[in-house]
Amino acid sequence: MINIAIVEDEQNQISLMKSYLEKYGKEKKISFTIESFSNAIPFLNSKKVPFDLVLMDILLPDMNGMEASKKLREFNKTIVIIFVTNLANYAVKGYEVDALDFIVKPIEYDFFAMKMDKAVRTILERIGKRIMLPPKKPQIVVSSSDIVCVEVKDHDLLFHLTSGQIFRFRDSLSEIEKTLPENSFVRCANSFLVNLQHVTRINGDSLVVGKETVPLSRNKKKYFYSKLANYLGDEK
Amino acid sequence: MPAFTALSVYKLISMGELILAEALFAKKLVRRKHFIWRLLLVLSLLFLLSLFFPIFYYEAWYVSIMFIALFFATIPAMKFCFEENWWNITFCAFAGYTVKQLAYVLSYTIIDGLSQITALGFSSTLVNPYSSSSTSSLFEGQNILTFVIFFNVYFLVYWLAYFVLVTRMEKGEDMRFGGAIYLFLSAMIVLIDVVFNMVAVYNMTDATAILIERLYNILTCLLALYIQFSLLHDRKSKNKMDILEELLRNNGKQYAMTKSNIDIINMKCHDLKKQITMLGEMKTIDKNAFQEVGNAVSFYESVVKTGNEALDTILTEKSLFCEKNGIKLTCVVDGKRLAFITPCDTYSLLGNAIENAIEAVENLPKNKRIITVIVKGFNGITSVHVENFFSGPLKMENGIPVTTKKDTNYHGFGMLSIKTIAEKYDGNVSIAITGDVFNLNIIFNKAS
């Protein structure tokens, strides 16, 4: 279930987007909840339902979409923002608010669907996949997006979680690797598997993921960069 | 001496084999007008020449000269039929000769070898096609099996040559390579192939010696073919690099030109807008007229501003083109992220990426003509992303798509150019396909 907010002052545009979402939802077998706002301010103040995606017009009364997005990012770093506008030049600056992309008006279905595909992938990636650890005798359930990296030490695996907790048990890294989402988990060295979601810096032979510094081996460099390139191109 | 000796018939057969072998390679040559007539003329002349070529001596030196002369006669014959330079024709001629020689020696070696294995009950006194004995001896002691083997070996060798070598060649390709190496190569082939073989045929009687000579001959032929084709490959690569450099230089010129055009447009727009505003304040004039002018100016407002001049230039140029051709180009671009790349390289990099995307979408239905460019980054990492719809099969080689267009000389350079520029700045290029969307992803890390 994906929660979507539409911030748009033209009613016919809202209806159009709702009908497209319905069509899209049927095609991809995804269900959405949709709430619309004709003004950015009530949207920002809305505490009812945490939205996964906001389709934001730029030309709005009182506060324009770009301003509103800046304010939004102050307290919400994870929501996916897609601008819907005919002001292409404004939207070029979308990176300033970490917007995923923008859709040009008049909105056409194929364009809409292309961007929704990306948005849905990003949202699902952020939610992550349910992982039970250890796999054979589950003690805890985490989301794959809570895993910062997996390290091999002696014959054990160390799962570094975003909470700071480290979960340790005996298993094979290659087996575990198969259960984790392959687009975000990458082997950067023989004994390390990192989650690209949490990679913040790369320094030649090491990379910073979450609070950990992890080695980047020479023969995995090219492969790592390719995976990261595709990951960044698709989401974040 | 009998009227028709084995050799007098064989030189004709040999010419036939040679022409067939050269034909394998000539398939990749560009034909002249009235090709069929030229071909018929030339074939008749060659056959007449080989039929009437006098055999004054049945000795190694004379026969070598004869076969070499007949071989060289095929070269102007090819020039007459094909619209190609001498280098390309000579390349095909030598390749053809080597293949024919290979088939000939191999078939004799196999037949000789098989007849040694008495268990096969296969005895043939192998006819010497170079002998001065009468033609009837050509068929003495032969059984059908010998012919079958000859035919099969020739067929196999020619087919392999086609499959392994000719398929690597491209029509209209430039087969020239370094003059000196080539001359040496050709001299070597001729010497070993023809002369030594003739010496062996006319002077050797020891079976072991003959076998060894044949094996050396086979190896030389294979080696010669290998050298010919790998030199070709090297030359192709060098050629590609030359063309690439040329294209990049052209891009540089184009960048300068487009940039100055856009500066002019910018200036004019600014002036125009000022005037319009002024006129608009005079309440007596028709508002519709202004609406139209305003719209025209808006078109020129598709000047993109990303904070990076080179990016502004290429994105504006491409968005104007896309607008004219019914393609939607959208950009989310943080220009500062590419500040470490020179303006010319930025222009080429994005230019090629967007051109590839345009090529992919221009024949798609209107609603799928969408290209998106996203440049963003964090902490020293810069991501360049271009996505577009595409249709049809995609041929990949080393993770990079290879052009499916027939004219490979100039197509497919976009990808090579992108890769070259990216690698110049320690970047990494990667392709991802998500459904019917093609994603080009380039990543740079300036923190390392």
Image (tube, coloured by chain):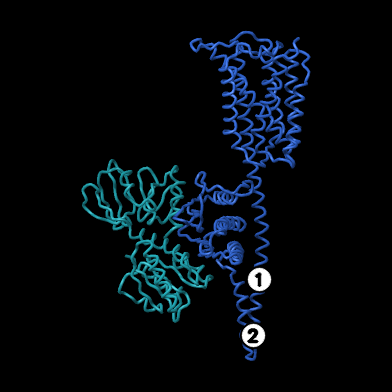
Chain colours: A cyan, B blue
Same subunit: marks 1 and 2:
yes
Residue A149 in percent (x, y) is at 34, 51
For mark 1, name the chain. Answer: B
Q: For the N terminus of chain B, which image quadrant?
A: top right
- Residue B42 lies, with reference to residue A34, above or below; the image says above
Q: Residue at the location (59% across, 74% down)? A: B298
The structure residue drawn at horizontal position 66% and vertical position 82%, both measured from the top left corner, is B275
Q: Is residue B86 left or right of residue B267?
A: right
- Left or right: residue B279 versus residue A218 is right
Instruction: Report the residue that reaches farthest toward the bottom.
Output: B284
Height in image: B161 above or below B410?
Answer: above
Circle nearer the N terminus (1, 2): 1
Where does label 2 land, which residue? Answer: B278
Q: Chain of mark 2?
A: B
Judge by depth and name the residue closer to the eye, A201 or B370: B370
Residue at 45% across, 60% down: B378
Q: Nearer the viewer, residue B199 or A135?
A: B199
Is B206 above or below relative to B420?
A: above
Say few, some or many: other residues with alpha carbon within 10 Å of mark 1 (under 14 / 14 to 19 / 20 or more): some
Q: Which residue is mark 1?
A: B265
Image position of B299 with respect to B359: above or below? below
Measured from the top left, where is residue B414 in percent x and y?
59, 52
User: SS class of the residue under badge 2?
Assistant: helix
Q: CA distance from mark 1 to mark 2?
A: 20 Å
The residue located at (68%, 22%) in the rendering is B13
* Residue A125, image quadrant: bottom left
Residue A167 position, x and y percent, is 26, 51
Which amino acid, by three-letter code, is at mark 2? Met
Callout 1 secondary element: helix
